[in-house]
């Protein structure tokens, strides 16, 4: 395919590119115009839907407010008439005033308003005369803000937010007050406004809601917060009803979001196919209603379809005009190039004496002149290249050999330029460091630094390289995994014929295994093979260090000599493998009883030693001895065996019982012997 395209003449390429660029420019312009118009249309319809939704919401809220106000006023008026009737009986001598007030109170308390509303009476001085909560009756409410408003107005309608005891949030509440002067009662009928949904008459605002039409078939509808369809052109019941299953997905979203807008597919009962709709909806918290306005997108975007057709027709017509013009321009430009191409084809065949006509117009003539000059130089260079070819072939073979040696060397090799950036590494470099070549090329070798050497170390290294041309020694570097490792490294500088440094070559060998073997030998020489604790030699060394530190700080050092009571019976009865496990568990238990700065050592057999550094008093020594005896009263569990093993302890304290390691060790051993004489499972402090 690519080869076929290459064979097509330039005039056709130019025709294609001219046409494509022109079409692209028109397409982009048309797309921008279409996008701007579409965005404007979408903004207009969204604004129209939002405005209509807000207007419908205001209409419904107004109807709700009037219904609530009228209902509360009607209840207030009726109760005022009842109290006036009771007062007439008092004036006629048929009832005592106290009995009349009692009857009036009973009548007021027997009524409920909405679901949780009630009626109460407040005197002109702010005292509660009637209230459903008996405990509040006769309470002075004159300092309460709501009571102060009631005392001031005495009659009329009032809206406010109220939170009863035990409720988390305030709710909107409405009240209508009438004043019964003979008894100085302000009769207040109050209820939460969201409990008056049943008072609303849909017919009061149905015609107004249905008058909002969007496009040809758009409409408005109202849902309640629990999914009841309050008003819809044809849906009834609830959104979860089987006959309303089509709208359940977007109805559920609306009930969850409360406010916003959605797009969805909708199929009307009298239509075969579903169409995409847009809905904008708003929540009325007081009624827990959602007012929604909808429109079909195809009706909204109908002008856009006509605009898109016009844009496509314009682009197509323009292309029909530009194609022949592009072909003509391409032919006039490429005709001299075609003639030059024939000459070049002859030159390619090996005719070094071929020359082009230099009288062509414009760049074609300039190109012909350059072509002739090129052919003159080419003829001269051809002879020179023939001689150089043999030399380069030999050099290439040498380079391949050196590359083979470089890549297969067992040592890691890296080459950096004069600036210190890596330009090449071999496979052994990757095997040792874990870095692939792509990870380190053009980077400084400092990425391998382990931070185990200070700046002086590297300063001396580079001083040796600059002065002597090389450096060799042991160094710690870091692998790609973050692990530090030791290596033997040799760095040499490479200079050109002017003795200027052009590269540095680093050759290194990983000596991790050698170091590990050295550490293992050292560890085995100073640690117990069974428990891993310091042995007798390391313990004595640490005791000497602790004494030196104690002399400087003027503190004390305690040394405990211990062995296990009757350990021989364990080996004899259960065998040495069980005895070995017991010794390991003993060592772990001892480690849990000492501080990090203390030393626990195994001297051999069942003998152990604890070196307590920085002791401030004899009481610390006694406390540790008590903890040891107490902890070893707990049996050890090994396989199915439960072994009770106790300790015999002897202790000596520096400087009281000796000022050197040998004396303290001897005196602690004497104290241990004294403990065994006393019956074991105890401790003794050395005394002279």
Image (tube, rainbow, N blue to C red):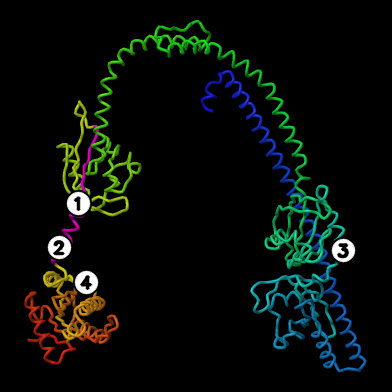
Mark 4 against mark 1, which lies toward the viewer?
1
Q: CA distance from mark 1 to mark 3?
A: 95 Å
Residue identifier under label 1: 511
Which residue is the site of mark 2?
522
Mark 1, Cα crowd under 10 Å, few <14 / some 14-19 / many 20+, is some
Q: Is residue 172 above or below residue 6?
A: below
Return the disc, 4 or 2, that comes first in the chain's sequence: 2
Q: CA distance from mark 4 to mark 2?
A: 22 Å
The stretch drawn in magenta includes residue 361:
no
Q: Tell me if label 4 and label 2 are in contact, CB under 8 Å.
A: no
Task: Point out the tag, 4 or 3, that comes first from the N-terminus.
Answer: 3
For the residues marked 3 and 2, what is the alpha-carbon distance in whole angstroms?
Answer: 100 Å
- Judged from this view, the residue extending furthest toward the right is 92
Q: Secondary structure at mark 3?
A: helix
How many callouts does the rendering have?
Answer: 4
* Residue 204 numbered tag: 3
What residue would you read off at disc 4?
Answer: 597
Counting residues from the start of the chain, the first of labels 4 and 1 encountered is 1
Choose the circle earlier in sequence order: 3 or 2. 3
């Amino acid at each position: 395919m690519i080869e076929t395209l290459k064979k097509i003449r330039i005039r056709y390429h130019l025709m294609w590119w001219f046409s494509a660029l022109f079409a692209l420019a028109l397409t982009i312009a048309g797309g921008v115009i279409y996008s701007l118009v579409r965005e404007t249309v979408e903004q207009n319809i969204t604004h129209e839907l939002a405005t209509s939704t807000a207007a419908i919401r205001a209409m419904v809220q107004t109807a709700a407010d009037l219904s609530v106000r009228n209902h509360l006023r009607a209840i207030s008026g009726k109760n005022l008439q009842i109290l006036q009737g009771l007062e007439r009986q008092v004036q006629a001598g048929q009832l005592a005033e106290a009995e009349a007030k009692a009857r009036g109170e009973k009548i007021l308390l027997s009524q409920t308003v909405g679901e949780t509303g009630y009626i109460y009476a407040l005197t002109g001085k702010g005292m509660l005369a009637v209230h459903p909560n008996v405990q509040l009756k006769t309470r002075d409410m004159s300092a309460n803000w709501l009571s102060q408003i009631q005392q001031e107005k005495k009659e009329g309608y009032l809206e406010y937010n109220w939170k009863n005891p035990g409720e988390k949030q305030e709710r909107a509440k409405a009240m209508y007050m009438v004043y019964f002067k003979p008894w100085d009662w302000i009769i207040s009928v109050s209820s939460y406004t969201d409990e008056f949904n049943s008072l609303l008459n849909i017919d009061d605002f149905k015609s107004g809601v249905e008058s909002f039409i969007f496009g040809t078939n758009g409409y408005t509808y109202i849902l309640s917060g629990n999914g009841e369809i309050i008003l819809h052109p044809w849906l009834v019941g609830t959104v979860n009803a089987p006959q309303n299953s089509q709208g359940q997905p977007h109805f559920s979203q609306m009930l969850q979001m409360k406010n916003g807008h959605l797009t969805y597919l909708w199929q009307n009962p009298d239509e075969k196919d579903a169409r995409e709709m847009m809905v904008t909806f708003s929540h009325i918290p007081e009624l827990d209603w959602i007012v929604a306005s909808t429109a079909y997108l195809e009706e909204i975007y109908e002008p856009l379809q006509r605009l898109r057709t016009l844009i496509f027709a314009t682009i197509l017509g323009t292309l029909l005009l530009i194609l022949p013009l592009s072909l003509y321009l391409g032919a006039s430009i490429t005709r001299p190039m075609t003639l030059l191409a024939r000459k070049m084809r002859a030159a390619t065949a090996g005719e070094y004496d071929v020359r082009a006509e230099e009288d062509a117009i414009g760049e074609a003539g300039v190109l012909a002149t350059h072509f002739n000059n090129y052919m003159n130089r080419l003829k001269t260079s051809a002879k020179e290249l023939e001689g150089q070819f043999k030399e380069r072939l030999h050099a290439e073979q040498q380079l391949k050999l050196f590359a083979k040696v470089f890549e297969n060397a067992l040592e890691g090799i890296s080459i950096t330029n004069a600036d210190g950036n890596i330009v090449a590494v071999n496979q052994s470099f990757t095997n040792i460091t874990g870095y692939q070549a792509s990870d380190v090329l053009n980077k400084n070798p400092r990425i391998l630094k382990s931070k185990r050497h200070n700046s002086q170390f590297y300063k001396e290294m580079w001083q040796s390289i600059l002065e002597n041309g090389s450096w060799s020694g042991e160094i710690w570097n870091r692998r790609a995994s973050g692990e530090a490792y030791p290596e033997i490294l040799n760095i040499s500088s490479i200079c050109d014929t002017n003795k200027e440094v052009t590269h540095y070559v680093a050759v290194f060998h990983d000596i991790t295994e050698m170091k590990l073997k050295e550490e293992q030998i050292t560890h085995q020489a100073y640690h117990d093979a069974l428990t891993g604790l310091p042995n007798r030699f390391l313990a004595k060394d640490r005791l000497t260090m602790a004494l030196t530190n104690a002399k400087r700080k003027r503190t004390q050092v305690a040394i405990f000599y211990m062995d296990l009571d009757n350990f021989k019976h364990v080996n004899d009865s259960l065998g040495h493998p069980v005895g070995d496990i017991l010794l390991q568990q003993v060592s772990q238990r001892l480690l849990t009883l000492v501080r990090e700065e203390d030393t626990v050592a195994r001297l051999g057999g069942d003998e152990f030693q604890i070196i307590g550094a920085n002791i401030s008093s004899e009481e610390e020594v006694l406390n540790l001895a008590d903890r040891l005896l107490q902890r070893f009263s707990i049996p050890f569990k090994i396989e199915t065996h439960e072994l009770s093993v106790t300790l015999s302890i002897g202790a000596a304290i520096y400087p009281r019982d000796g000022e050197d390691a040998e004396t303290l060790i001897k005196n602690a051993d004497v104290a241990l012997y004294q403990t065994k004489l006393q019956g074991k499972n105890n401790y003794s402090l050395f005394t002279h």
